[in-house]
Amino acid sequence: MRTASAGGVTETSELTSANIIAPDTAPDAFALTAQTGVAPGAPVTSDSITVAGINAPAPIGMVGGEYSIAGLPFTAEPGSVVAGQSVQLRQTASTSGSTVRQAVLTVGGVQGVFSVTTSNAARSDLDGNGKADLPWRDTNAASPSFGRNIVWLMNGATRAGSGEIPRIDDANWRVVGP
């Protein structure tokens, strides 16, 4: 029970569980946008999310990467976050092509997954532009160009150039994918 007086007026109130707000550290669900076609081994930063639905500081932690609160330096150490703060994630993409790597952010027991998928261009990028190129080999033994190897240097779906790879007349040689 609490009593307060002011200007000759006395007011008495009683604290009950009905008028005490319990701390809520479980935020509203949040989603992190997956990124695809990322260069193998590249550092990748997520879009920002804004923490909402809590009325007290909530614990924050990360597995598989680092997080930054409100633009502060990235860290992997456990910490706390309050409503209205922005959070960004960072991880390093796999060094293998066509591979998914996931980082998991946990805020007040609610998890969000940041998935990063590498491109497969590293396996077939012959000119270093980050786009897959197309090798061709004439395997028709009756053809006058048998054993000839050509590569189309691609910029997405557009041929940006071409080149010849030394001819190999041995029919046992094949151009194969990864």
Image (cartoon, grey):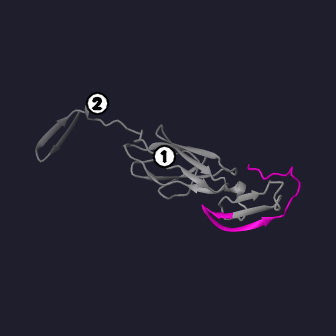
33 left or right of 131?
left
The residue tagged with tag 1: helix, strand or loop?
Answer: strand
159 within the magenta span: yes
Residue 148, can we see it? yes
Task: Please give the name of the residue rendered at 85% of the width and 62% of the height, measured from the top-left corner.
Answer: 167
What's under tag 1, amino acid-wise?
Ser
- Report the residue that reaches farthest toward the bottom: 161
Image disc number at residue 65: none
Give how far across and how far down residue 161 sits, in percent.
68, 69
The crowding category of the residue bearing disc 1, from other C-alpha atoms within 10 Å (few below 14, some 14 to 19, many at least 20), is some
Task: Please give the name of the residue rendered at 16% of the width and 43% of the height, measured from the top-left corner.
Answer: 5
Dot in front, 1 or 2: 1
Depth check, front residue: 3 or 63: 63
* Nearest to N terminus: mark 1 or mark 2: 2
41 within the magenta span: no
Question: Mark 2 highlights which residue?
Answer: 17
Question: Mark 1 highlights which residue?
Answer: 80
- 59 over 167 or under it: above or below: above
- Report the residue that reaches farthest toward the right: 170
152 left or right of 83?
right
For residue 140, what is the image quadrant? bottom right
Q: CA distance from mark 1 to mark 2?
A: 26 Å
Give how far across and how far down residue 119 sits, in percent.
63, 53
The residue tagged with tag 2: helix, strand or loop?
Answer: helix
What's under tag 2, amino acid-wise?
Ser
Look at the image and give the residue range highlighted in magenta.
Answer: 153-178
